[in-house]
Image (cartoon, helix red, strand yellow):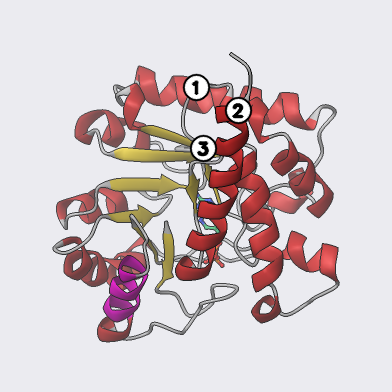
Amino acid sequence: MGILNVTPDSFYDGGRYATLDAAVARGMNMAAHGADIVDVGGESTRPCAKPVPEEVEAERVLPVVRALAERIPVSIDTRHARVAEAALDAGAVMVNDVSGFTADPEMLALLGRRRPLAVAMHMRGTPEDMMAHARYNDLLGEVVAELRARMEAALAAGLPEDHLFLDPGIGFAKTWRQCLTLLDRLDLLAALGRPLVVGVSRKSFIGQVLGVLNPEHRLFGTAGAVAVAVARGARVLRVHDVAEMRDVARVAHAIVRASEEVAPA
Ligand code: HH2
């Protein structure tokens, strides 16, 4: 999954694709480099980000979704049901909601009605206050239980089970050490039975491990995290650097498969 943020303030690619032409070219480029789907977002959800009015978000994303969806599969990264629905009308096939369908009371009904592919990500609170919620007695148990609840809500609303993807929400209401623990134990989330989407790309936990403040310098750190995520069962990698991370993921996957093939029956 290639990341395409049409925002002025995303932590890494904000402001880079400010015109329709630049955004569409970027989306097509990621597809050419092997992205199976491009995730278009119009609202930064980095820690402390302020919410964007729905109309502004819609104005940013819809022309891009419309232009790309004619040619490649598109996902809409939004917490807002009206933006999601307009993006589906414009041709998007997936709704990626970092709030796990909790931010907008209309989102679950939309999923039941339109039945798109959908990603339920784990977080607590809102991007503005989520880091105050990074308190867990049992990190793994609580994230699994909260994601299971999101899954059950989506299925109860009428989303077909095989349309649902789950995501641990790396960096959302988690400290950098909690991010590392979750990535190491992705198997516990995979046990929920749905494919896992994992978004580690250039995030600050990598900067914390490496002592690198600038996301520009986190490419190889991202590669390390992508390789482990694949080895622990991630099925979709949400990344900025599609060509590079596709190679990383393919090699990690080939290694895991090799040991599976020689394992005794
Ligand atoms: N991370 C971000 C945004 N959307 N969606 C999913 N499913 N998983 C993630 O980990 C995830 C996500 C944040 O990253 P980015 O879009 O690069 O930055 P920003 O929120 O600043 O736009």
Residue indicated by mark 2: 262
Q: Secondary structure at mark 1?
A: loop
Ligand 1 neighbours mark 3 (CB distance < 8 Å): no
Residue indicated by mark 1: 193
Q: Nearer the viewer, mark 3 or mark 2?
A: 2
Task: Kindly check if marks 1 and 2 are in contact, taking CB atoms under 8 A apart as contact.
Answer: no
Residue at the extreme top of the image, as rendered: 265
Cα separation between marks 1 and 2: 24 Å
Residue 262, position as x, y percentages in the image: 60, 28
The quarter of the rendered structure image containing the N terminus is bottom left
Region of the chain picked out in magenta, as a range: 23-32
The part of the image, by quadrant, that contains residue 27 is bottom left
Q: Residue at x 21, y 71 (%)?
A: 63
* 113, above or below 128, in the image: above
Which amino acid type is marked by label 1?
Answer: Gly
Is 116 contained in the magenta span?
Answer: no
Cα separation between marks 3 and 2: 25 Å
Q: Residue at x 74, y 29 (%)?
A: 140
Q: Residue at x 27, y 76 (%)?
A: 24
Q: Is residue 17 left or right of residue 226?
A: left
Q: Nearer the viewer, mark 1 or mark 2?
A: 2
Residue indicated by mark 3: 196
Q: Is residue 116 left or right of residue 243?
A: left
Q: Secondary structure at mark 2?
A: helix
